[in-house]
Amino acid sequence: MKEREKLVAPCGIDCGTCEFYLSKHNEQILECLVSKGIPKNILPCDGCRNIDGKCPIMPTDCATFSCTKSKGVDFCSDCKDFPCNMLAPAADRANTLPHNLKVFNLCTIKRDGLESFIGQSGKIKLSYFKGRMVIGKGPEQVN
């Protein structure tokens, strides 16, 4: 797996577009996160795969990461139990966390391949957070 590909977590979240990871190369992002109460000593994050699922903002190791590791799959979508309850969407903090993108991202990876997904990932995330929902059509694409 190439270095950029390692930044896509087993659950489908693209750590390469996460502000916690991006703060590694951008002082403004780092300062913004700290101003929002994120402890500076846990920043930046190197991405889920690179830290063996020990996400700095989680109180314990990531159960989803541990599950994929124990089942020997690269992505949740490679598992015979996909989709499982760990990937279920939730309205709680949906406006600030990308977790409801997991299943969509995993399906996109399966359909288009990991490299193609990485090229689309930023736009997918932007459409999720900034797009307007058109009932029956999905979110409007944001440029």
Image (cartoon, rainbow, N blue to C red):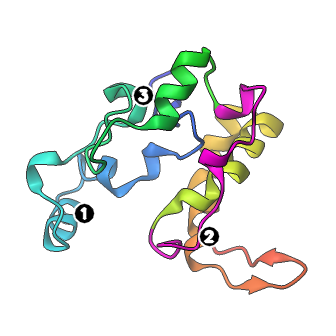
Q: Is residue 109 above or below residue 26?
A: above
**Measured from the top left, where is residue 109 in percent x and y?**
72, 38
Which residue is at the far front? 85
Give me the residue at 62% from left, 70% from top.
128
Vertical order, 133 against 143 (above or below): below
Secondary structure that dominates the magenta span: loop
Residue of label 3: 49
Foreground mark, 2 or 1, reads: 2
Along the viewing direction, whichever of 61 and 27 lies nearer the viewer: 61
Residue contact at pointers 2 and 1, CB within 8 angstroms? no
Amino acid type assigned to the residue bearing label 2 in the image: Tyr
Residue at mark 1: 29
Q: Secondary structure at mark 2?
A: helix
Q: Is residue 113 magenta?
A: no
Q: Is residue 20 found left or right of 16 in the rendered image? A: left
Give the CA distance from mark 3 to mark 2: 24 Å
Tag 3: amino acid: Arg
Which sits earlier in the primary sequence, circle 3 or circle 1? 1
Query: Which residue is at a point 38% across and 32% down the rendered structure image?
Result: 53
Decide: few, some or many residues near mark 3? Use Cα within 10 Å; few <14, some 14-19, many ≥20.
Answer: some
Q: Is residue 47 left or right of residue 90?
A: left
Give, as a three-letter code, the residue at label 1: Ile
Please give the residue where the numbered disc 2 appears in the rendered image.
128
| Mark 2 → mark 1, Cα distance in angstroms | 20 Å
- Give residue 118's position: percent from left, percent from top: 60, 42
Question: Of the numbered discs in the image, which one, if any, rests on residue 141?
Answer: none
